[in-house]
Image (tube, rainbow, N blue to C red):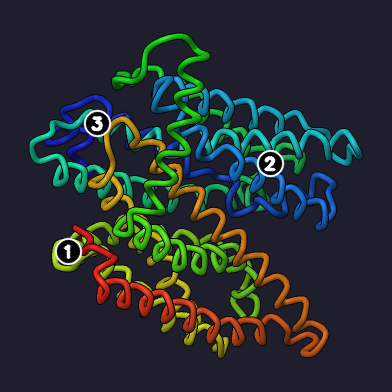
Amino acid sequence: MSSVLARTGPFEHRNPRLYVLFTTLYNARAYYPVLAIFFTDLGLTAEQFVFLNVMWAVAIFTLEVPSGALADVLGRKKLLVFSACIMVVEMGILLAAPKNGGTLLFALCILNRVLSGTSEAAASGADEAIAYDALPEQGREAAWDDVMSAAMRWRSVAFFITMILGGLLYDMEWTRHLGFTVPVEISHRLPIALVFLQGIACVVITSRLQETPHASGSAAKRCGSAFRLTLGTAKKAFTTRSIAVVIIGGMLIDSVARNFATITSEYYRLIQIPEWSFGLLGALSGVVGFFIPAVARRLNARFSPLGVLGIAGFLAVIALALLAPAWPWFGILPTMLLMALLGLVGFTVNRHLHASAEPSQRATLLSVRGLAFNLGYGSFSLGFSMLLATMRKTAGEDAFRAALLWQLPFVAVMIALFFLWVAWGKRRGRISPAP
């Protein structure tokens, strides 16, 4: 981490250094541990909050790949500055949204979620691409490993801080012991205000990036090029077997882990963890994530990407098997394992795609990955919610525990079928070994 501040190694170059700062401030948001209750405390119903998540998913699903192509042909810096500006606007909307504002509140929250998905789609792929292409070609893969490791560690430290800080800022009852109080109406907006300031910092950071080469010509011509690049890169991603199998394998594991990440608070209640400790456990996940880059680098140096994904898939099944019995307190351990796999899979897939991508289509290929991962996550989340609804009819109050148990064989079979398909393809010579 100190190499970023000392500007040594790959961080002698401006873009990789600014990328680490941007991805840290952009992703470590203090409202994450209180996201659901923030919206419901504003006056939305649980059903309206679910609808907001759907709107976010639709926005990012629709714009993920086109934004990557636009970054490749219009300029990555432009997309990143746009993304940071949208981040400021979406936070400003939440700061101004009226509590119990009825239709106006709901409309503003929908706008916030759509802008949030738009911002994330614009940044996805463009941030890594502008940093990767700024590195010297000689020794680029090793240098990029250093950049990814540093970025993951910075984000882990930032998540550790923001997970704790977000909860403390949102509920400031503890200040009574210090002799003063903060009105609830103010404290509930403090995590949002902090992220608003982070958004301003992101605008400053992205404006200092050095643009990488991109297509020239009129805007109409370049937008046409973006459309063709989108189609061509998506076709390449899913017809080049060594790329496709890594994306699909990563998607399978990521979707399982990400879905569980959204329901960890429900699981902690199930295993009798007190609610005051949820933020601390989230911070503990950040501590675990700090050590993942070193593990990921060693595994990727020793095994192929498919080999690493095989290890991750096996560990995911083990984690789900240990989660299903819902043992009090012990369930924290497999939860941390599943969260750690998110970092391992992300590191492995990104490393392989950067090595496989042409510079002119790097952001687009990374956006294809993002689209596939979000599609997988959305599909698995929808399937899990349908399973949970079914379990409520048969298992009643024990529905959540039953759903955890039933998802285990499904995930195990899906991962096993994937690797059997890969083995069959290799035997027939249709899947080249991943570098």
Task: Determine crowd level at label 3: few under 14, some 14-19, many 20+ residues with C-alpha closer than 10 A.
Answer: many
Task: Determine crowd level at label 2: few under 14, some 14-19, many 20+ residues with C-alpha closer than 10 A.
Answer: some
Taking the image as shown, residue 221 lies to the left or right of residue 288, namely: right
For label 1, the SS is helix
Q: Which mark is residue 133?
A: 3
Q: Is residue 8 visible?
A: yes
Q: Earlier in the sequence, mark 2 or mark 1?
A: 2
Nearer the camera: disc 3 or disc 1: 3
Toward the front, the furthest residue is 428
Query: Considering only vertical position in the picture, is 245 above or below 359?
Result: below
Q: CA distance from mark 2 to mark 3?
A: 42 Å
Q: Which mark is residue 187?
A: 2
Task: Pinpoint residue 315: horizontal percent, then vertical percent.
Answer: 37, 78
> Where's the N terminus, which quadrant?
top left
Q: CA distance from mark 3 to mark 1?
A: 24 Å
Q: Earlier in the sequence, mark 3 or mark 1?
A: 3
Which residue occupies 42% across, 62% down?
Answer: 248
Task: Pinpoint residue 272: horizontal percent, then vertical percent.
Answer: 62, 81
User: Pointer 2 and pointer 1: residues touching (CB < 8 Å)?
Assistant: no
Mark 1 — residue? 298
Taking the image as shown, residue 315 lies to the left or right of residue 180, namely: left
Nearer the camera: disc 2 or disc 1: 1
Which residue occupies 35% across, 18% down?
Answer: 208
For label 2, the SS is helix
Amino acid on which disc 2 is placed:
Ser
